């Protein structure tokens, strides 16, 4: 009798555990999603890098804060995926409401948007990538020994640098003599009033703006219309010295 009760209790516990497991998730649904060829800076529980995705009903790219189980991502390729999406019943504070798993990669397309194809020539591209660019003029005002600078990365169309006080980062896109800055993020230190003013002016100038640019006398120059709004001096990439 005791053995039967013990077996019954064990089965009951396993059954309850199974039911509890089922209650943690709803029925999975299959959806199509497109993953963009570049990631973007975003803020979840803290600063991070997110996929940019589109669903069937999307009008524009959306941040995707979680992961996709079974998905191997390579920058520079745009993916169309068939994924199963399962809603969690009890969502942890730092987790997505859904579990995403790849069922099939429907399409993998190389997107040729590298800077070499949009700058004038390879020599010009190397010139941009192989140097750090110190801010020497902003909105017509010469910047003496400015701490602000930009570094452009070839592989993933990202940049980083300093705005004067905080480190900044984001994405860029060169196209036909123009450069666009997107999704600029930064650290959150407080500095002197002078440095904070420079930082605010610099970030506000760059953020979500498209500039005409040229390179002349070892300077990188940005224009809005016909007005020169920022000038950068060439410095050594490793040491930061001219």
Image: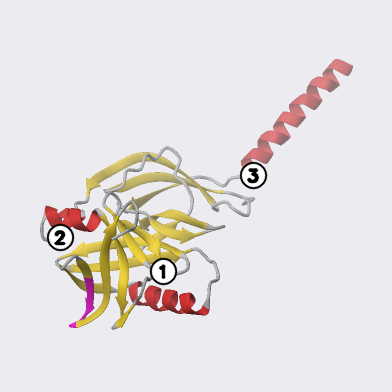
Looking at marks 2 and 1 on the same chain, the residue that comes earlier in the sequence is marked by 2
Residue numbers of the magenta segment: 221-226
Pointer 2: what residue? Answer: 119
Residue 77 image point, x, y percent? 27, 47
Name the image quarter holding residue 103. top left
C-alpha span from label 3 to label 2 = 55 Å
Main SS, magenta residues? strand
Which quarter of the figure is the C terminus placed in? bottom left
Residue placed under numbered mark 1 in the picture = 163
> In the image, residue 218 lies at what x, y percent?
19, 65
Q: Residue at x 42, y 37 (%)?
A: 70
Specify which label sits upstream in the sequence, 3 or 2: 3
Rounded to the nearest angstrom, the CA distance separating label 1 from label 3 is 49 Å
Q: Quadrant of residue 116?
A: bottom left
Assess whether mark 3 and mark 1 are in contact (beta carbons under 8 angstroms): no
* Residue sitting at x 22%, y 72%: 221
Tell me the crowding category of disc 3: few under 14, some 14 to 19, or many 20 or more residues within 10 angstroms, Cα based.
few
Asked if residue 137 is among those painted magenta in the image, a careful observer would answer no
Q: Marks 2 and 3: in contact by CB < 8 Å?
A: no
Which residue has dot 3 on it? 23
């Amino acid at each position: 009798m005791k053995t039967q009760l013990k077996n019954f209790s064990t089965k009951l516990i396993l059954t309850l555990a199974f039911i509890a497991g089922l209650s943690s998730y709803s029925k999975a649904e299959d959806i199509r999603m497109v993953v963009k060829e570049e990631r973007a800076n975003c803020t979840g529980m803290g600063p991070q890098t997110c996929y940019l995705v589109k669903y069937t009903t999307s009008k524009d790219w959306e941040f995707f804060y979680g992961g996709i189980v079974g998905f191997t991502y390579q920058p520079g390729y745009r993916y169309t995926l068939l994924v199963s999406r399962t809603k969690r019943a009890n969502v942890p504070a730092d987790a997505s409401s859904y579990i995403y798993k790849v069922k099939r990669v429907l399409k993998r397309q190389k997107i040729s948007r590298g800077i070499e194809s949009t700058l004038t020539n390879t020599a010009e591209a190397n010139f941009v990538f192989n140097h750090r660019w110190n801010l020497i003029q902003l909105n017509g005002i010469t910047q003496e020994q400015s701490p602000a600078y930009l570094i452009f990365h070839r592989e993933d169309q990202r940049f980083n640098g300093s705005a004067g006080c905080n480190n900044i980062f984001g994405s860029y896109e060169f196209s036909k003599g123009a450069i666009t800055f997107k999704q600029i993020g930064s650290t959150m230190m407080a500095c002197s009033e002078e440095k904070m003013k420079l930082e605010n002016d610099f970030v506000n100038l760059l953020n979500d703006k498209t500039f005409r640019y040229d390179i002349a006398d070892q300077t990188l120059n940005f224009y809005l219309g016909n007005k020169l709004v920022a000038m950068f001096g060439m410095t050594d990439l490793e040491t930061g010295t001219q």
